[in-house]
Image (tube, grey):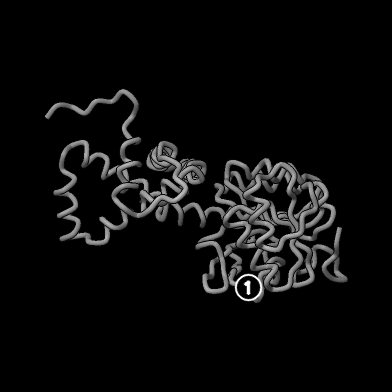
Amino acid sequence: MANSTDGGPLAPAGGGAVTGLLHPGEMGAAVGSVLRASGRMVLWASSGRSAESRRRAELAGLEDVGTAEELSRRVDVIVSVCPPHAALDVARSVAGFQGIFVDANAVSPTTARELAAVITAGGGRFVDGGIIGPPPAADNPTRLYLSGTDAALIIGLFNETPVAARVVSDEIGAASALKMVYAAWSKGTAALLLGIRAVARAEGVEPTLLDEWRDSLPELPGRSLGAARSASTKGWRWVAEMEEIASTFAAAGLPDGFHRAAAWIFDRSPRLERGQADEQTLDEVLALLPQPGHRPEAH
């Protein structure tokens, strides 16, 4: 394993730390790119990854080491950025890693603690993380919230980058909890808006609803079009995130039905390469939301 300082791999992870990134999706590639732009060495593992992932990694300037096993031997820090349904598999792929593993995925506090158990059982250190904001770029900053007893060690890794790393707590699960309650609103309400428009359309009152929104809640017509664009381009990635949010609510003793329904809406949304915030995209999304075989009641 590479050592970032004389203090070894568990010293504060500054500019000399070698970082492994699993995996370069849209967000992960952006995180890797800003680390590379600030002079960090960032490795990734191409084994089993798609041609699109390879293209993103190349554009981000990441160094391919082939396998996750090889990556874990050569880095001080691993940052996991993947769809939430894959988070446990990613952690298991590097079980036995002796450095700091940062899970920056949209998972529940319970899942974060399961991830911590996988990493610490192999002798590694675990930091819980949650990204809030867009894929980072020089003119497009984002926030990475961190928690756990080793969270402060990661701050230096993101110095002089558009990623503002902030420690929430020394408790594993706190950063994930913050991500869950934030996305419960920011993404959950997108599903709610789509459901509302689907019901209004089924009942024949959609034009009147839009008129009322323009009078009293003028941002909602445009937001509902934006929700359709998000559902058609990102909804498939948000299904598991909504399920993780639902589990977070249930663990706190609260009803989980709303975000289970949000997961259902995103799961049924079409997957379009370039959905737009327009009526055509909205129509394509709403057409798929009613349950199969359902017939609206006669009016």
Residue 91 shows in this picture: yes
Would you place residue 143 above or below residue 78 in this image? below
User: Does residue 118 appear to the left or right of 176 in the view shown?
Assistant: right
User: Does residue 100 appear to the left or right of 267 in the view shown?
Assistant: right
Q: Which residue is drawn at 85% across and 69% down?
A: 7
Would you place residue 271 above or below residue 145 in this image? above
Q: Quadrant of residue 128?
A: bottom right
Towards the viewer: 207 or 218: 207
Residue 231, image x and y in percent? 41, 47
Q: Residue at x 67, y 71 (%)?
A: 37
Towards the viewer: 248 or 132: 132
Residue 266, image x and y in percent? 42, 41
Residue 62, image x and y in percent? 72, 60
The residue tagged with tag 1: helix, strand or loop? loop
Residue receiving disc 1: 161
Identity of the amino acid at label 1? Thr
Would you place residue 170 above or below residue 120 in this image? below
Q: Residue at x 80, y 53 (%)?
A: 65
Pointer 1 local density, CA inside 10 Å: few below 14, some 14–19, many at least 20: many
User: Does residue 263 appear to the left or right of 87 in the view shown?
Assistant: left
Q: Residue at x 53, y 74 (%)?
A: 139
> Which corner quadrant holds the C terminus?
top left
